[in-house]
Amino acid sequence: MTQFLEQIRAARPEIAAREKANAEKGRQAMELRRLRDAAALTQDELAAAAGIEGAEVRRLESLVGPLPSQAEVDRYRAACGRP
């Protein structure tokens, strides 16, 4: 299976790039979730504290998709009581 994946990545470099981006997004999402859990906040409580919609919190905590901006991460962290 590994050899097959390597062949796919070599033939379609955009797949490897997408995998790399999703890995970073997943790492960042898990870190944000860890902060929210440590602050003992629900997604809705965090959304209210950050002044954003609950859907935005779910997007930030999603393991895939575009990386959030630094401003979004800063607002999320501040709502969790982290600078």
Image (cartoon, rainbow, N blue to C red):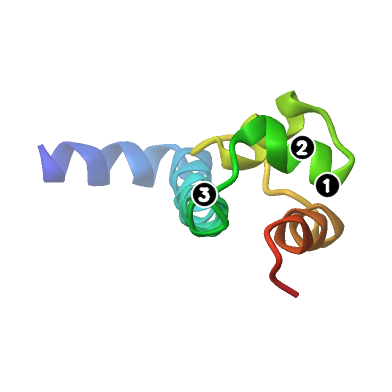
The residue lying toward the viewer, choosing from 45 and 59, is 45
Q: Residue furthest left?
A: 1
Where disc 2 sits, the SS reads: helix
Depth order, front residue of 70/65: 70
In the rendering, at what x and y percent does residue 76 appear?
A: 74, 53
Crowd tier of the residue under label 2, counting other residues whose Cα lies within 10 Å: few below 14, some 14–19, many 20 or above? many
**What is the C-alpha distance between the residues marked 1 and 2?**
5 Å
Task: Quote the CA–CA distance across marks 2 and 3.
Answer: 13 Å
Q: CA distance from mark 3 to mark 1?
A: 14 Å
On residue 50, the disc is 1
> In the image, what residue type sits under mark 3?
Arg
> Do labels 1 and 2 touch, CB within 8 Å?
yes
Image location of residue 79, percent across then percent down: 76, 55
Query: According to the image, label 3 marks what residue?
Result: 33
Query: Which of the 4 image quarters holds residue 41?
Result: top right
In this rendering, is residue 44 above or below 61?
A: above
Q: Residue furthest front?
A: 40
Say which element carries label 1.
helix
Please state, as top left, top right, bottom left or bottom right, where the C terminus lies in the image: bottom right
Q: Residues within 10 Å of mark 3 (few under 14, many from 20)?
A: many
Q: Earlier in the sequence, mark 2 or mark 3?
A: 3
Q: Residue at x 72, y 24 (%)?
A: 55
Residue 52 is left or right of residue 54, and the answer is right
Identify the mark at residue 47; answer none if there is no mark: 2
Tell me which amino acid carries mark 2: Ala
